[in-house]
Image: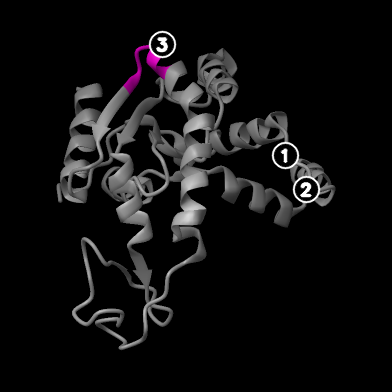
Amino acid sequence: MAQKTSCDIGPVVLLGPPGAGKGTQSKRIMEHYLIPQVSTGDILRYNVAQGTELGMAAKAVMARGELVSDDLVCEMVKKRLCNPDCRRGYILDGFPRTAAQAGWLDALLDDKLFDNSRPTRAWPIVMRLDVDYNQLLLRITGRRSCPTCGRIYNVHFQPPRVEGICDLEGSRLVTRNDDRREVIQPRLAAYEEQTRPVADYYQRTGRLVSVDGDRPADEVTAQIFRILEDHHA
């Protein structure tokens, strides 16, 4: 892996279906460029736990069994992006989920008041991890985890030495409920329906870059780093 760097890279958005490798690649970007991951889930939990005004409003909505509105989510994201650790860049996790949120993010980054809290303004670098549908199914339905140490295997691509048994602990491997075919197929369909408008939005603005997610993880990382370096060359 390339040496860590602290150069400015601006906002990064990774799009891709479940099993595409977003979690792995996000972690590598964070470690290489020394930037934070901005997760809407984490932000929401933090605001609720801290009892902030936004958190209390969100808690009341969730208590009614309703989804937290875009307005509340966006306001939480805005406050998080104003923190000093986001000055050189950040990876957005779980945001934007809709074309409306993507438009809001562009408007926020174009806002002159927001600009003053950052050294420079940069549009998001948007990368979509493209993975063949059948490959996704193999990646997800083939996943097995050790309930003792948490190590992840894949029966198709990275099997344990002894079938069904963790190499380290000797524990019997388990399949998460979310990784079962009957669960994942509706999730993939929902992702396609919900996220396509976001990809289309960035495609229209000329900022969507496709990454070949079918390749081994290290090669995908190399692709991503080249895109980021070329963008800021």
Instruction: Report how far apart the C-alphas of labels 2 and 3 lie in the structure.
Output: 34 Å
Labels 2 & 3 near each other (Cβ < 8 A): no
Three-letter code, disc 3: Arg
Q: Which residues are magenta?
A: 202-208
The foreground one among 84 and 200 is: 200
Q: Earlier in the sequence, mark 2 or mark 3?
A: 2
Question: Badge 2: few (under 14), some or many (20 or more) residues near its Cα, within 10 Å?
Answer: few
Three-letter code, disc 2: Met
Residue marked by disc 1: 68
Residue marked by disc 2: 62
Residue marked by disc 3: 204
Q: Earlier in the sequence, mark 2 or mark 1?
A: 2
Answer above or below: position of 173 versus 202: below
Locate residue 219, reporting x and y percent: 15, 44
Answer above or below: position of 127 versus 176: above
Determine the residue positioned at 25% across, 32% down: 211
Labels 2 & 1 near each other (Cβ < 8 A): yes
Determine the residue positioned at 19% across, 36% down: 223
Residue 177 visible to an observer of this rendering = yes
The foreground one among 90 and 115 is: 90
Determine the residue positioned at 23% across, 62% down: 156
Where disc 3 sits, the SS reads helix
Determine the residue positioned at 42% across, 47% down: 18
Marker count (numbered): 3
Locate residue 194, reporting x and y percent: 54, 31
Locate residue 142, reporting x and y percent: 32, 62
Answer above or below: position of 89 versus 158: above
Q: Earlier in the sequence, mark 3 or mark 1?
A: 1
Question: Badge 1: few (under 14), some or many (20 or more) residues near its Cα, within 10 Å?
Answer: some
Q: In terms of image quadrants, where is residue 113?
A: top right
